[in-house]
Each structure stands twice: as structure tokens, then as C-alpha cells.
């Protein structure tokens, strides 16, 4: 790249990203202290290492013209499916799920995290070829089938949270690709109604005679996943079971007050009452120890991050770049809203981490790869005329 191209670099976006990465290390230095008592700084050191690797990956992806990925669409798509299939044959089990592949270097990788990036890059090209041709219901079939295969493989692991992220990515990119808003929106609304009715029938036990046959309607999901989708509406109904995470999280955030209890002074997190407080429920630690001011500050940084990402999408030089950016924005937005929502008790617990903040090597590398792709689109937002 020459100096004229580098003039397009979004320094505010880079600055906000760096602030979020630094916030991750600060928050993890208190959230993970008691997770591994033999090495209190284990997760901070691992996170710092993955951040450095992620910065390198982001830099490489930023230098590469994003248009080059179009040439390898089907290769990338096939590699994505292959990685997800390998999980079933050589995957490592943890907490009742098979989502990771063990490496000889002493750490595991989670292919479903990288699958999100692969599907964004490939679906963007698939939809770019069909922009302006997504006006009828039949036009939605092929894009849906394109994303359905990796979604089903991830759901089978099982990983409901990442499966839902795929849905968010698909919806965001379809609208940006020009899908008829009334027809596509109507399908989404109809699908939501069907899911709601199916859940109601599954958990119903005293239906009228003419609906008695539908009581306990079987659904293609594990029972614990179904309970997690509904327990947030009344977590007190199972305080020691599925509602435990939500109750502990609400107590943690609520007890922080305006300024919080102070660094490493929280009780729910430090005493390990709050499960997964270094990953899925790390936002609860922010609320408990840094209070309302801390949570608002973090959410403000995310807001600026998303606005800059959206600006990159709007200034993209072509449809492909815009769709890549839209997919990434959809992914980040869904992650943030659902993670904050589930820790606050207003959304189901789906096991979705807080991007750029939660501990996790695969998630951090995936997030930084997304940053690199956004920078690649941003750097090439205008064609050089001389």
C-alpha cells in the first residue's frame, strides 16, 4: 500500500478498538483472579498473547485487498465446512459440548468462531452477485441454503449461541443486499411467531381438549437449551438450577450501584458465586466492581466502535465491501446486545461472549480478524484516480 491509500485509515476506529482491548485486560485482571488459583494471572497473560496475535492478523488482513477473497469463495466455504466436520471426529469435549479441536501447542481452537468470519466473506460474494434480484420468496431460498449447512453443523455441537449469531448475520446482510423488506420481513415475523408458538406448546401442560395432542411438542433441541431460552422470564422458578446464572448476575450488577464496589472488591465474582465471570458473564463483573459509570463507559466505547464500523460500511467502494462490513456489524451488534441482555436478565442465556472483552483465544482472533477486514474495506473506500 502507498501513502495515498493509508490516508483512508480510520484512526478513531483503531483508537476505540485499542481502548476496548486495554479494557479487556483490566477487567480480566479482576474477573479471572480466582478462576485458576494456582496462576491468578493465567487468563490475563493468555488474553494479552491472543491480543498480540490478533493485532498481527488484523494488520495482515488490512493490507490484503478484500476483493481477493472473492476468488476463493468456494475454497473458503469448503474449508469452513471441513473444519466444522473435523470437530465431530477429533473434537474435545467440555461441559457437555464438542466445540473445540485440541492442538499440539497446549491450547484448543473453536472452529465455530472462525466460521462466522468465513461465512461473512463468502456470503457477501454470494449476495453481491444477486443484489437487486432478491425480490421474491423463491429468491431467498439459495442464500438461506448457503448459510444453513454450517448453521446445522454448529447447532449439532451443540452451540445454540453461535447458531443464533449466524441468523443475525444472515438477516443483516440480506437487508443490505436489497432483499424485499416486506416479504423478507414478513418471513422473519412469521418464523418468530412459529418459534414462539412451538415453545409455548412444548412447555404447556394444561391445554384445552382440542389442543391436548400438542402438549409437550417435541423440538429439535436439547432440553437444557430450551429451558435457557425461557427461564429468564422467571429465574426464581429454578433458583438453584437454570435460573442461578441470571439471579447471580442481576445481584452482581445491581449491587454495584453508581460507582461500583471497587477493583477486586466484588463478592459475586471474587467469591465465585457468579459462574463463567471471565467469559460469558464478564459484563456482570464490570457492573459489580465499576458500577453504573463503568458499564455506561464500556457501552459508550462499543457504541462508537459500532458507529465507526457502520460508517466504513456506508463508505465502501462496492457492494462486496459493504456486505462484508454489514455482516461484521450485525455480528458485533448481536453479540453485544445479547450478552448485555442476558447478564441483565432481560434475554435468554445463550452462552455468547462479550466481543473484544471476554477471555477466549479463538473469539479474540476472530474478533480481530473482523477488525482487519473492516480496515481493509476502509483503506480502499475510494479508488485512486492518479
Image (cartoon, rainbow, N blue to C red):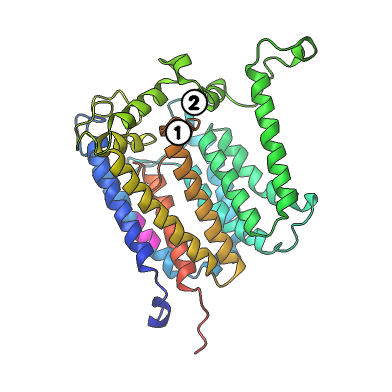
Q: Is residue 32 left or right of residue 188?
A: left
Task: Please say if 53 is above or below 45.
Answer: below
According to the picture, the residue beneath numbered tag 1 turns out to be 342
Whether the residues at callouts 2 and 1 have beta carbons within 8 Å, the answer is yes
- For residue 369, say whether it is visible: no
Q: Is residue 64 left or right of 156 when viewed as pictured?
A: left
The 10 Å Cα crowd at callout 2, few under 14, some 14 to 19, many 20 or more, is many
Q: Residue at x 38, y 63 (%)?
A: 13
- Name the one closer to the observer, 221 or 207: 207
Which residue corresponds to the image point at 49% horizontal and 20% vertical from the top-left?
234
Farthest residue, direction front: 258
Residue 379 % position (x, y):
45, 72
Is residue 231 toward the left or the right of residue 191 in the image? left
On whether residue 162 falls in the magenta region, the answer is no
Rendered residue at 24%/24% (across/down)? 271
Q: Which mark is residue 46?
A: none
Q: Between marks 2 and 1, how big is the CA–CA gap?
A: 8 Å
Residue 50 image offset from top left, x and y in percent: 32, 50
- In primary-sequence order, the first of circles 2 and 1 is 2
Compared with 3, 72 (above or below) is above
Quadrant holding the N terminus: bottom left
Residue 252: image quadrant is top left
User: Pointer 2: what residue?
Assistant: 232
Please give the range of residues in magenta.
Answer: 54-58
Q: Nearer the viewer, residue 214 or 119?
A: 214
* Secondary structure state at the residue bearing disc 2: loop
Where does the image place residue 108, in percent across and percent down from the top left?
Answer: 39, 40
Quarter of the rendering containing residue 55: bottom left
Up/down of 285 relative to 324, above or below: above
Amino acid at each position: 500500500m502507498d501513502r495515498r491509500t493509508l490516508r483512508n485509515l480510520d484512526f478513531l476506529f483503531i483508537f476505540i478498538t485499542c481502548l476496548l482491548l486495554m479494557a479487556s485486560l483490566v477487567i480480566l485482571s479482576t474477573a479471572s483472579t480466582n478462576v485458576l488459583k494456582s496462576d491468578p494471572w493465567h487468563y490475563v497473560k493468555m488474553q494479552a498473547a491472543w491480543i498480540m496475535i490478533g493485532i498481527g492478523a488484523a494488520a495482515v488482513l488490512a493490507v490484503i485487498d478484500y476483493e481477493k477473497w472473492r476468488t476463493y469463495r468456494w475454497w473458503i466455504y469448503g474449508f469452513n465446512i471441513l473444519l466444522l466436520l473435523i470437530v465431530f471426529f477429533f473434537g474435545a469435549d467440555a461441559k457437555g459440548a464438542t466445540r473445540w479441536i485440541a492442538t499440539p501447542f497446549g491450547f484448543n481452537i473453536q472452529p465455530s468462531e472462525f466460521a462466522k468470519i468465513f461465512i461473512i466473506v463468502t456470503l457477501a460474494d454470494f449476495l453481491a452477485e444477486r443484489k437487486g434480484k432478491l425480490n421474491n420468496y423463491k429468491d431467498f431460498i439459495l442464500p438461506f441454503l448457503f448459510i444453513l449447512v454450517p448453521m446445522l453443523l454448529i447447532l449439532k455441537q451443540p452451540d445454540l449461541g453461535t447458531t443464533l449469531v449466524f441468523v443475525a448475520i444472515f438477516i443483516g446482510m440480506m437487508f443490505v443486499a436489497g432483499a424485499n423488506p416486506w416479504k423478507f420481513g414478513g418471513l422473519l415475523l412469521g418464523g418468530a411467531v412459529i418459534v414462539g408458538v412451538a415453545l409455548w406448546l412444548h412447555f404447556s401442560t394444561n391445554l384445552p381438549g382440542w389442543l391436548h395432542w400438542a402438549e409437550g411438542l417435541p423440538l429439535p433441541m436439547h432440553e437444557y437449551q430450551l429451558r435457557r431460552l425461557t427461564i429468564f422470564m422467571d429465574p426464581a422458578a429454578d433458583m438453584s438450577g437454570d435460573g442461578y446464572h441470571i439471579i447471580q448476575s442481576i445481584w452482581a450488577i445491581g449491587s454495584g450501584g453508581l460507582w461500583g464496589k471497587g477493583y477486586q472488591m466484588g463478592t459475586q465474582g471474587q467469591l465465585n458465586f457468579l459462574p463463567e465471570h471471565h467469559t460469558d458473564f464478564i459484563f456482570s463483573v464490570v457492573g459489580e466492581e465499576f458500577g453504573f459509570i463503568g458499564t455506561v463507559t464500556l457501552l459508550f466505547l462499543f457504541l462508537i466502535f459500532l458507529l465507526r464500523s457502520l460508517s466504513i460500511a456506508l463508505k465502501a467502494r462496492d457492494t462486496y465491501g459493504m456486505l462484508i462490513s454489514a455482516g461484521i456489524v450485525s455480528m458485533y451488534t448481536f453479540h453485544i446486545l445479547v450478552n448485555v441482555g442476558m447478564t441483565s436478565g432481560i434475554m435468554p442465556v445463550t452462552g455468547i461472549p462479550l466481543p473484544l472483552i471476554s477471555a477466549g483465544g479463538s473469539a479474540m482472533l476472530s474478533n480481530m480478524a473482523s477488525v482487519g477486514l473492516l480496515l481493509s474495506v476502509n483503506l480502499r473506500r475510494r479508488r485512486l484516480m492518479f
